[in-house]
Image (tube, grey):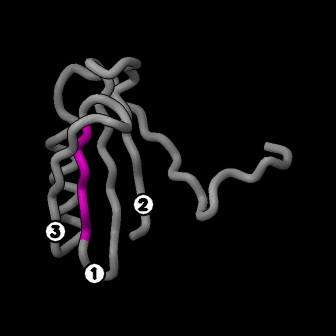
């Protein structure tokens, strides 16, 4: 599964942090809505098309949070060489 995009609501802490991930696996698109950071609770949505998945993402990002898009990690993690 390849992560395409990641959004974060800009808040720290287990109670306030929320993340939304857009991933693709073959011809299936997956959206994860996570509350509470890495050890939080997730809700998953599966779609047949990128358009349908992106519509779900737009709906999840609505509201008063200050969402910011984060870059996905490259395969194998970040290079420790120069940035």
Q: Secondary structure at mark 2?
A: strand
Query: Does 53 sit left or right of 5 as displayed?
Result: left
Q: Quadrant of residue 41?
A: top left
- In terms of secondary structure, what is the magenta stretch mainly? strand
Residue 27: mark: 1
**Mark before the other along the chain sequence, 3 or 1:** 1
Marks 1 and 2 sit apart, C-alpha to C-alpha, by 13 Å
Image x and y of residue 10, in percent: 40, 23
- Tell whether position 38 is magenta: no
Highlighted range, magenta: 29-34
Image x and y of residue 80, in percent: 79, 47
Residue 42: mark: none
Residue density around tag 2, few if under 14, some if 14–19, many if 20 or more, within 10 Å: some
Q: Secondary structure at mark 1?
A: loop
Residue 3: mark: 2
| Residue sitting farthest toward the front | 39
Q: Which residue is mark 3?
A: 47
Residue density around tag 1, few if under 14, some if 14–19, many if 20 or more, within 10 Å: few
Q: Residue at point 34% right, 69% down? A: 24
């Amino acid at each position: 599964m390849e992560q395409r995009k990641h959004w974060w609501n800009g808040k720290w802490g287990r109670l306030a942090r929320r993340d939304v991930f857009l991933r693709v696996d073959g011809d299936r698109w997956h959206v994860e809505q996570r509350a509470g950071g890495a050890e939080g609770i997730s809700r998953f949505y599966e779609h047949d098309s990128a358009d349908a998945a992106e519509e779900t993402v737009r709906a999840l990002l609505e509201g008063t949070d200050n969402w910011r898009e984060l870059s996905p990690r490259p395969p194998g993690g970040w290079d420790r060489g120069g940035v």
